[in-house]
Amino acid sequence: MKKTQPSIILILLFLVLLFGLLGWRLFHLQYCQAQNARLHSHDQLHAVVPVSPQRGAIMDCRGRILADVQEKYILFADRNSFPGPDMLKEAAWQLQPILDIPSHEICAAIYGGLTPGYIKLKEGITTDQRDEIQACNLHGIGIQTDWERIYPCGALTSHVVGYVGYLEDKREGVAGLELKYNSLLEGREGKEVYVVDSRRRPIGMALDDSRDVHNGAGLVLTIDATIQQFVRQALLKQMQKYQAESAVGIVMDPRSGEILALVSLPDFAPSEYSSYVEDKKLPLKNRALCDPYEPGSIFKPIAVAIALDAGSIRSNDVFYCENGYFTQYKIGEFLNHPYGNLSVKQILAKSSNVGMAKIGLKIGQKRLYDGVRLFGFGEKTGIDLPGEDAGVVWPTNVWDKYTVTRIPFGHALTVTTIQIIRAYCIIANDGHPVIPHLVKAMIDEKGQVFPVPPDPGFVAQVIKQETAKWLRETALVEVIKNGTGDQAKIAGIQTWGKTGTANIARPREQGGGYDEKNYIASFVGGAPAEKPELVVLVSIRKPNRSLGIGYSGGRVAAPVFREIMENTLKYMHGGQLPEKAVASKAADMPDS
């Protein structure tokens, strides 16, 4: 009896340990692993099908579609629904001739899928393929209806609208307004959850687990597709004529800041953006925003405005222009013109570098720097597009004695074309600044329209009204009548503006200095002079001088300005220029 007691004790201890472990296992399963078990059970009993939201449309100010969506079909597999490998192989065998994909590749894709309940097999199957697959009635194979982005206008608004691409297998806006307003446009994904049987066949929908899809909001732009086409056609024609490297054209309403057209060439087809990534001409680059350069003579009216407003000069002052070369500051005139005494108006009309250098000396470093910054140079304009460059305005503590004479004729600082046209809008708008913007309104999925005002600026007045008025109605009209901008004349309406033939600065790694062979030809201005409706900028980079047909802003860019301005004003006024329309109405009025 004594010999059996240890055995009994060992057995009892073993039983206690066994039941203790069993109890612990039950506790672990019931409490510690309960959530995992519930999720696993839920996954076995349910199938989830994601429902992609419809991306919001983008349209121009007249409701013309610039970006939209169209249906596409995605073939997917649910690996859990195949009871065995034979059924999976049978499904792959039947799909092979329809998809023109070897059956072993289809099997490998299904077995290798990371999410067994939803494995994407092919995106963008045709309607005929969809019908054939549905007729086969294959278990474990489904077809999801999705949306793909389309751009009906092609390259016309490519740098404004941008494009949609894939980031980590998710479609998102990658450039332009598609990127800037991605969170509004993309909406919120939904899901349909089905209760399934042991063979993964749907029995019914689990409404509590399903989530409604919310389609994206639409955008109404300030862009007018017709004006955009005027600009693009005129730029393309001149680029080809002068074999230029690139070009930018912008049309703005100077009182509201609305951009009616923005073209950067070369451009691209948004639906095929990936084929342009390696293009050495950089068609994906929006040169209106992210291509800073030394502006040259189109900056001269800005410096004159700063000088007049600060009281540094008067409009009737006369400056001796050193017969074409300012020895002390090593400044010459374009084409070596031997100018003598010139008034401020003549300095702008003749585009005298020496005259502008002397105006810079009158202004002084601090007032010149402050004035340039007040016009918004050296900081972003706030346009509602991504990728904007701020340009460079160096602080006065790094200026040398030449800087104050260089900035007035557009050297020793860098700007973007959107900054330049914004500055000319200040002149057109009696000294008041505006924020360039592209989005006018948002449309929610219920069709309600909500205006989208631009962010308000903090500066109420940049220059005095009389300064702006004298510049555009006197000095910059003189540029058209008797100066370098004669090619910008439009019969029946008074245009105003300034030409520019800017040197291109070489990078330091190329030795610095300026390119002696290539220039940027520009013209910026508006019409009518008394109360401008539009401001137009044209900038054409590296027109081919060897053609022998000219390369200056007056020869290359001014005619494009004229064509864009005339076509746009006629389009906005029913085929007539504004002054003619007013005259005809006055003629029809009876005598009082």
Image (spheres, rainbow, N blue to C red):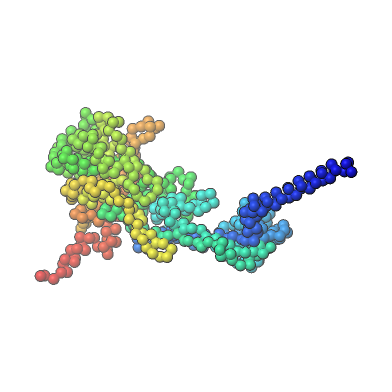
Q: Is residue 424 left or right of residue 264?
A: left
Camera-nearest residue between 333 and 67? 67
- Total label count? 0
Viewer-proximal residue, 356 or 393? 393
Which sits in the foreground, 124 or 474?
Answer: 124
Q: Which quarter of the image is occupied by the N terminus?
A: top right
Asked whether the viewer can see residue 372, the reply is: yes
Q: Position of residue 319 (x, y in %)?
A: 15, 37
Q: Identify which residue, 140 or 316, lies in the foreground.
A: 140
Position of 86 relative to 419 (above/below):
below
Q: Is residue 163 left or right of residue 126?
A: left
Residue 348 against residue 205 in the figure, above or below:
above
Q: Horizontal and vertical percent for residue 36?
A: 63, 53
In this picture, is 120 found above or below 335? below
Which residue shows up at 87% across the image and 43% down it? Answer: 4
Quadrant of residue 493 within the rendered picture: bottom left
Q: Residue at x 55, y 60 (%)?
A: 191
Q: Residue furthest front?
A: 1
**Residue at left 23%, top 52%?**
429
Rendered position, 180 above or below 508:
below
Q: Is residue 209 left or right of residue 512?
A: right
Q: In the displayed orientation, state which residue is furthest to the top.
A: 328
Task: State whether residue 334 appears in this view.
Answer: no
Residue 482: image location, x then y, percent: 18, 47
Residue 253 quadrant: bottom left
Q: Position of residue 195 (x, y in %)?
A: 62, 64
- Residue at 53% x, 61% y is 211
Q: Quadrant of the C terminus?
A: bottom left
